[in-house]
């Protein structure tokens, strides 16, 4: 039998608004689910995504949406059937004639956590009834390479090849190609203009994508959603401002960045004052493109930006794959008041197609309620997130596990819909760079 862990305790007295939001979502569930069905019919969901949420008690909002999720090994195994069914739906929607899926991974050969994720992702696709093989663009992979994992599983990486307008491995060239590589290092030439369904499109890799674009769509969606169910959109929306270019090493653009921080803090303080929220506003500065928790910091006032030392400036300028972070996003800081064994935690929701397939808590013993938890030293607690986010229980209290998780699933799917609109915009060639 699975563990019966409950939602981690919220160490704050400011739980009223969240409880009210959860109760309101429960009461509006039929209307909410009908709205989601209509939205995803108009704009199909990505193949998969994960969303990092922050629960402040008075606010529940996404802070990051990953279109190349790399934590499938952290999902509760009891929910695997949900992922398998969702994968069948996702592949059928993208490529109805597909009998196989080619996975293109990150160039990791020693990151055991990532490789365990890759193994589980392959298992899900195999269980869904598709041949699934892994084609690596890592130049070190020149022949089929079998890797032994700590879990006892084995993983075979094969060198990716191209024949005319199709990519594959050996004699395997399926119509569905699934990226599990966020393309921080750029767009691989081997994947350009292929005659296969690439999930998601190349334009959604970090070589092209901006978080500003995503959160712009998210803000539009939450305005629509809030009007539909009559809530204040601020409860589920982080204020986000683009800023750039910024060169941390040369200290150029820092004054403009400090002004953006000041604007976010002032607007947040005004809302706190109007709603009697007894918390100090803070802002998160992060690279407008990129992941892995790099080039991100929490600040309490504009002077924090102007007084950065050399080590801090070097850290903020460094992104994945050796890229230099220049375009920045200043975002309203959302506290995380969830706590597991005296350590701060934040929920991460995983989705395949338009279905929630589970999630986990990211936990960090060395961070505070205002810090970025996606950093070295984090660990994951899947047992606390063992029920699907789409199965509320009207007979339990609004903050009982299945109901709080339903609220998480609703907000995560709003972010998923924003990603769907990003993809639709990319397919129509309408993506634009952020304006400062």
Image: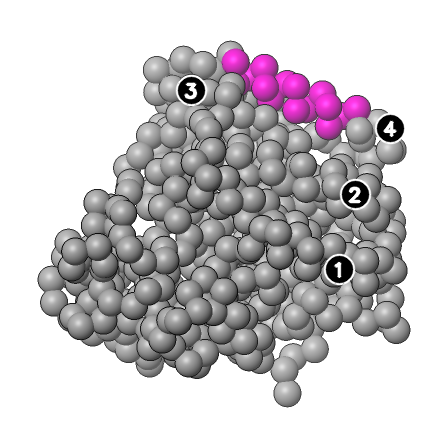
Asked which secondary structure carries label 2, the reply is helix
Say which of 189 and 282 sits in front: 189
The residue identified by callout 2 is: 226
Q: Earlier in the sequence, mark 2 or mark 1?
A: 1
Q: Residue 246, which numbered label? A: 3
Asked if the residue at tag 4 contacts the one at tag 3, i.e. Cβ–Cβ closer than 8 Å, the answer is: no
Q: Residues within 10 Å of mark 1 (few under 14, many from 20)?
A: few
**Which residue corresponds to the image point at 28% horizontal and 55% vertical from the top-left?**
195
* Residue 247 magenta: no
Asked if the residue at tag 3 contacts the one at tag 1, i.e. Cβ–Cβ closer than 8 Å, the answer is: no
Q: Earlier in the sequence, mark 3 or mark 2?
A: 2
Whole-angstrom CA distance, mark 4 to mark 1, is 33 Å
Q: Which of the 4 quarters of the picture holds residue 178?
A: bottom left
Whole-angstrom CA distance, mark 2 to mark 1, is 15 Å
**Which residue corresponds to the image point at 80% horizontal and 29% vertical from the top-left?**
271
Asked whether the viewer can see residue 346, the reply is no
Q: Residue furthest left?
A: 142
The residue identified by callout 4 is: 274
| Residue range corresponding to the magenta coloring | 256-270
Asked which secondary structure carries label 4, the reply is helix
Q: Position of residue 58 (x, y in %)?
A: 79, 44
Which circle, 1 or 3, is nearer the viewer? 1
Whole-angstrom CA distance, mark 1 to mark 3, is 43 Å
Q: Residue 34, which numbered label? A: 1
Say which of 415 and 269 sits in front: 415
């Amino acid at each position: 039998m699975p563990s019966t862990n409950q939602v981690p305790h919220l160490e704050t007295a400011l739980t009223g608004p969240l409880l009210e939001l959860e109760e309101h979502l429960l009461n509006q569930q039929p209307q909410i689910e009908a709205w989601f069905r209509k939205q995803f019919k108009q704009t199909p969901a990505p193949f998969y995504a994960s969303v990092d949420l922050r629960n402040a008690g008075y606010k529940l909002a996404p802070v990051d949406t990953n279109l190349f999720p790399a934590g499938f090994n952290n999902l509760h195994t009891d929910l695997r059937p949900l992922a398998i069914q969702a994968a069948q739906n996702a592949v059928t929607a993208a490529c109805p004639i597909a009998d196989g899926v080619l996975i293109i991974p990150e160039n990791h050969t020693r990151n055991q956590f990532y490789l365990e994720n890759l193994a589980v992702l392959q298992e899900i696709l195999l269980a869904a009834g598709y041949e699934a093989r892994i084609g690596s663009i890592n130049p070190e992979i020149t022949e089929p390479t079998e890797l032994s994992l700590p879990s006892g599983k084995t993983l075979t990486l094969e060198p990716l090849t191209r024949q005319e307008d199709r990519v594959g491995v050996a004699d395997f060239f399926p119509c569905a190609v699934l990226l599990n590589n966020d393309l921080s290092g750029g767009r691989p030439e081997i994947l350009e203009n292929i005659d296969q369904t690439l999930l998601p499109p190349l334009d959604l890799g970090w070589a092209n994508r901006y978080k500003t674009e995503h959160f712009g769509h998210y803000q539009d969606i939450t305005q629509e959603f809030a009007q539909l169910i009559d809530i204040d959109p601020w409860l589920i929306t982080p204020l986000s401002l683009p800023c750039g270019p910024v060169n941390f090493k040369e200290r150029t653009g820092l004054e403009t960045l400090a002004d953006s921080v000041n604007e976010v803090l002032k607007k947040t303080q005004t809302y706190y004052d109007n709603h009697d929220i007894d918390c100090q506003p803070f802002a998160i500065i992060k690279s407008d493109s990129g992941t892995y928790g790099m080039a991100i910091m929490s600040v309490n006032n504009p002077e924090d930006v102007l007084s950065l030392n050399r080590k801090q400036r070097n850290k903020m300028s460094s992104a994945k794959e050796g890229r230099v972070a220049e375009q920045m996003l200043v975002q309203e800081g959302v506290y995380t008041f969830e706590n597991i064994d005296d350590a701060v935690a934040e929920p991460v929701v995983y989705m395949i197609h338009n279905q929630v397939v589970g999630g986990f808590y990211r936990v960090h013993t060395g961070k505070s309620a205002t810090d970025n938890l996606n950093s070295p030293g984090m660990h994951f607690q899947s047992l606390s997130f063992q029920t699907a986010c789409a199965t509320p229980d009207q007979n339990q209290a609004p903050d009982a596990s299945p109901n709080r998780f339903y609220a998480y699933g609703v907000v995560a799917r709003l972010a998923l819909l924003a990603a769907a609109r990003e993809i639709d915009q990319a397919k129509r060639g309408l993506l634009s760079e952020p304006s400062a």
